[in-house]
Amino acid sequence: RIEGEVELAFTIDRSGNPIDIRVIRAEPPNTFDIEAIRAAQRWRFEPGRLDGQAVATPMTRTLRFELGG
């Protein structure tokens, strides 16, 4: 069985889409990075708001992976 975690940092744009997605931590390194980024590209969020206006918002998320057994 292979297990791992990937922590991503990205910005939620004013439309709620994640942009500038990057891996900031991965264990084991380079094992699940590409799949984590692919998953994040499909996510949608409510954008942050400031004075009633949508604003870009930084965010981090950790994804856990498990293969086999």
Image (tube, rainbow, N blue to C red):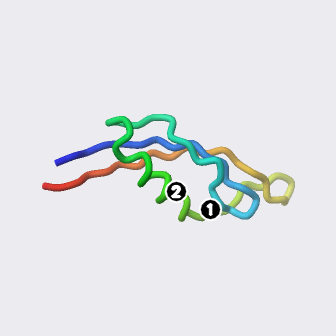
Give the number of the disc on residue 36: none
Q: Position of residue 59 (x, y in %)?
A: 61, 45
- Say if mark 2 contacts mark 1, CB within 8 Å: no
Crowding at dot 1, Cα within 10 Å, few <14 / some 14-19 / many 20+, comes out as few
Residue shown at the point (63%, 56%) measured from the top left: 18
> Which residue is tagged 1?
45
Count of marks placed on residues: 2
Viewer-side residue, 11 vs 29: 29
Residue 25 position (above or below residue 68)? above
- Secondary structure of the residue carrying tag 1 is loop
Residue shown at the point (49%, 52%) measured from the top left: 37
> Which residue is tagged 2?
40
Figure quadrant of residue 58 = top right
Q: Position of residue 63 (x, y in %)?
A: 41, 49
Q: Is residue 13 left or right of residue 1?
A: right
Residue type, numbered disc 1: Phe
Residue shown at the point (31%, 43%) measured from the top left: 4
Residue 4 position (above or below residue 47)? above
Which quadrant holds the C terminus? bottom left
Q: Position of residue 54 (x, y in %)?
A: 79, 59
Residue type, numbered disc 2: Ala
Q: Position of residue 50 (x, y in %)?
A: 82, 52
Figure quadrant of residue 48 = bottom right
Q: Is residue 12 left or right of residue 30?
A: right
First in residue order: circle 2 vs circle 1: 2
Q: Is residue 34 left or right of residue 4?
A: right
Viewer-side residue, 39 vs 44: 39
Q: Is residue 33 left or right of residue 21?
A: left
